[in-house]
Amino acid sequence: MGRTQERATTHPLDPLDASEIAAVASIVRAYDGDGGGLADGHRFVTIALAEPEKAAVLGWADGGAPPAREAEVVILDRRAQETVEALVSLDAGAVTAWRRRRDIHPMAVVSELMEAEEAVRLHPDFQAAMARRGVTDFDTVQVDAWPAGHFGPEDETGQRLCRAVAFIRPRPGDSEWAHPVDGVIVLVDLNTLEVLRVEDHGVVPIPAEDGNFDAETAAPLRDDIAPLEITQPDGPGFRLDGRVLTWQRWQVHVGFTPREGLILNRLSYDDGGRRRPIMHRASLSEMVVPYGDPGPTHYFKNAFDGGENGVGIAASPLTRGCDCLGEIAYLDAVVSDAEGAPVPIPNAVCIHEEDVGVLWRHIEWRDGSGEVRRSRRLVISSFSAIGNYDYGFFWYLYQDGMIELEVKLTGVLSTGAVAPGVEPEHGTLVAPGLNAMVHQHFFNFRLDLDIDGTRNAVDEVWTESLPPGPDNPHGNAFRPRRRRLASEREAQRTVDTRSARWWEIVNPGVRHRLGAPVGYRLLPGGTTFPFAQPDAPVSKRAGFMRNHVWVTPYRPDERYAAGDYPNLHPGGAGLPEWTSADRPIDGEDVVVWYTFGHHHVPRPEDWPVMPVATAGFLLKPVGFFERNPALDLPPPHPHHHC
Ligand code: CO
């Protein structure tokens, strides 16, 4: 099995292909309904499918007409210092909506960051700051531009600001992250590429030790690795029809957007011939990485890698035998550049099966009889490289109806420098003079669950100990408790391992044979709470960090946990804003927004490249199936017991 197969009909949630992106860009460029249209020097930010409303997709799936094919386009009009939001009908070949805004800043464009970095590198004040540190070969300077964030009135100029820091790359191919230039911070206007300010907070020696991790540097390499081949002589067990993936009982449409990257659409399970919906759409809605160092080169670091950079735009092509192993199918992605030209990302999504050990087992101790079944999962994954970090987004579907999301965090630590002999207060020394600052990674996933239909509800389930007394004479008693979350404010919840708290998304209208509503249980994995002050700029801008669970009624325009445009935004947008209405959620088409985090106090072992750390969550069927749905798995070795 290889590439995406050609197909006769387009799925309404298929991402725009390269020819559609090119067509949209030329339709937008030709548009003159706006007093002459776009000025020279404009940049396309994103060109993406305007997803049809859920009702239209469900209608199409029931045999109705395909929804209109539309694109949503965001363009920076640099000369006017405005953002254009355009809607383009691909069926009509025309712009159908055009709105100019000055109140927002769309995500960063790769080319504007690179042009800003070059402007900084060539600026005399910046070069003077480098020279004060003994750096005179400016070709070795790697400037690193970050979206500026929002830190008060001076960031309210309306300018499209970025803050840039610098690293030294002694030789081409070296890891620049080993040689941070601490104390120098540059403010740039991305629209004009003007360097507004070069601050020098004092010279700290640039760490000298290299931090390369290529095979040549690491040599001699181990020679005791035995070959491990994963083969499926009959090919993989899944089938791809376009982007609709069928594996055993599961079916899902694999979507992709420039902002969110990998998306699961219309996930369902075939239960004895009945295809049961579970999740309409699952996506990374936002992420943020707040750093804990208050120093002038680091305080502003809190990357919103979804809404500021685009996780899909940053997706990397995957390599057979490296990123995934075995019988693999790939899906390509296409994003766009500043000119609106399609940029293909070949092999952006990897699909394969994995053996994951034992699924269930019982051996009778008296006579050794029994049964064992192995577990296999379908893996749908992508990797994005954003700045120094690499994030893998891995969805797993299991044979017992379980769904898992795992983020793999790897790449290179963000670094600063400290003077010799100084122990950093807000970080870990990972090499002489090299400070890896403490930080946290928060991810918010938007889960539009549709358990056996769209009308769902969310219960909180916890466990309580009973006090000693006549009902608890031996002190052992505990029991689960459950309450329905009625409204958005009531559904703003945090994890609590002491009470074994979790949440169950149920369909009150569909009952299990034993009486309870069918459902799926959201089980938190390892997570964390934010350490930034509640009124800190990052806490306002990433309000979704505050709670692990939020629940909203479905609205097509509520897609991103920190709002549509978090770049340079003062905060309050997204979940905190929507849920202030405190809308009812019991029996509605609910959307669960789950925030989880990875708390990162770096270790020397995370240097010079970080072994994968993971964070994520599970969705487990609870009363969805009559009993263990994996009883019908064949024994691993047919015709004889293990
Ligand atoms: Co980290």
Image (cartoon, grey):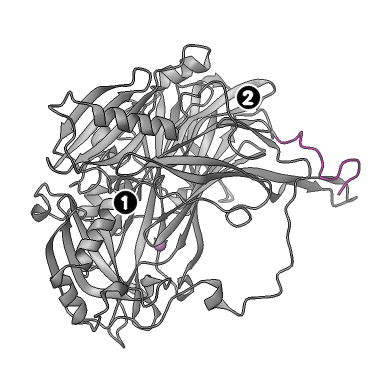
* Disc 1 secondary structure class: helix
Asked if residue 243 lies left or right of residue 339, the reply is right
Boundaries of the magenta span: 630-642
Residue 636 lies in the magenta-colored region: yes
Image quarter for ligand 1 equals bottom left
Residue 294 lies in the magenta-colored region: no
Q: Position of residue 494 (x, y in %)?
A: 38, 46
- Please name the residue shown 60% across and 57% down the image: 322
Q: Quadrant of residue 197?
A: bottom left
Q: Is residue 304 above or below residue 241?
A: below
Residue 575 seen in the figure: yes
Q: For this rendering, which residue is in front, 586 or 433?
A: 433
Disc on res. 90: none
Q: Can you identify the residue that label 1 sits on? A: 110
- Please name the residue shown 32% across and 56% down the image: 530
Q: Position of residue 31 (x, y in %)?
A: 23, 26
Q: Quadrant of residue 319?
A: bottom right
